[in-house]
Image (cartoon, rainbow, N blue to C red):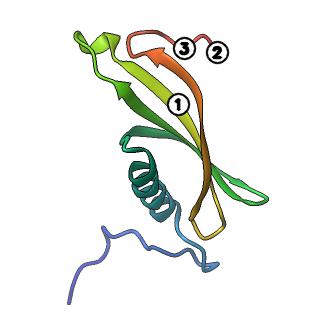
């Protein structure tokens, strides 16, 4: 018998993708479209049309690393987790604090 206590289900009880499956799928789709790999996904929100998430990526690597150019992207997904759109919200140097 296999212990599955550490595995996360890919579907929720309602039949839709689990939040973890959504995040994994969105990350893969964004990398395929942009070539940019998210370092973090700080926001995931259900909307009337599906899902909305934000992805933080490194757009330009600089030395020292604190001067690298970062970007925050907004990603929209349909209810099944398929990417329907993305846009860059802002760019900033990694070492800069958030003004919000």
Q: Pick whichever, 6 or 76, lies toward us.
A: 76
Residue 17 position in % (x across, y down): 54, 71
As drawn, the label of residue 61 is none
As drawn, the label of residue 98 is 3
Residue 66 position in % (x across, y down): 31, 12
**Who's the residue at 45% across and 9% down the image?**
96
**Who's the residue at 42% across and 38% down the image?**
40
30 on left or right of 86 = left
Tag 3 near tag 2, CB within 8 Å: yes
Determine whether the residue tagged by mark 1 lies in a helix, strand or loop. Answer: strand
**Who's the residue at 23% across and 9% down the image?**
64
Q: How many marks?
A: 3
Q: Which residue is mark 1?
A: 72
Relative to 24, is 4 above or below? below
Determine whether the residue tagged by mark 3 lies in a helix, strand or loop. Answer: loop
Q: Pick whichever, 45 or 57, lies toward us.
A: 57
Residue 12 position in % (x across, y down): 56, 74
Q: Which residue is mark 2?
A: 100
Mark 1–mark 2 distance (CA, rounded to whole Å) = 13 Å
């Amino acid at each position: 018998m296999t212990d599955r206590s550490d595995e996360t289900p890919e579907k929720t009880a309602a039949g839709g993708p689990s939040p973890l499956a959504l995040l994994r799928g969105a990350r893969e789709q964004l990398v395929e479209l942009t070539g940019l790999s998210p370092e973090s996904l700080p926001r995931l929100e259900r909307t009337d049309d599906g899902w909305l998430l934000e992805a933080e990526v490194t757009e330009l690597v600089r030395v020292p690393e604190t001067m690298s150019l970062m970007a925050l992207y907004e990603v929209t997904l349909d209810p099944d987790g398929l990417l329907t759109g993305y846009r860059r919200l802002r760019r900033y140097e990694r070492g800069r604090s958030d003004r919000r």
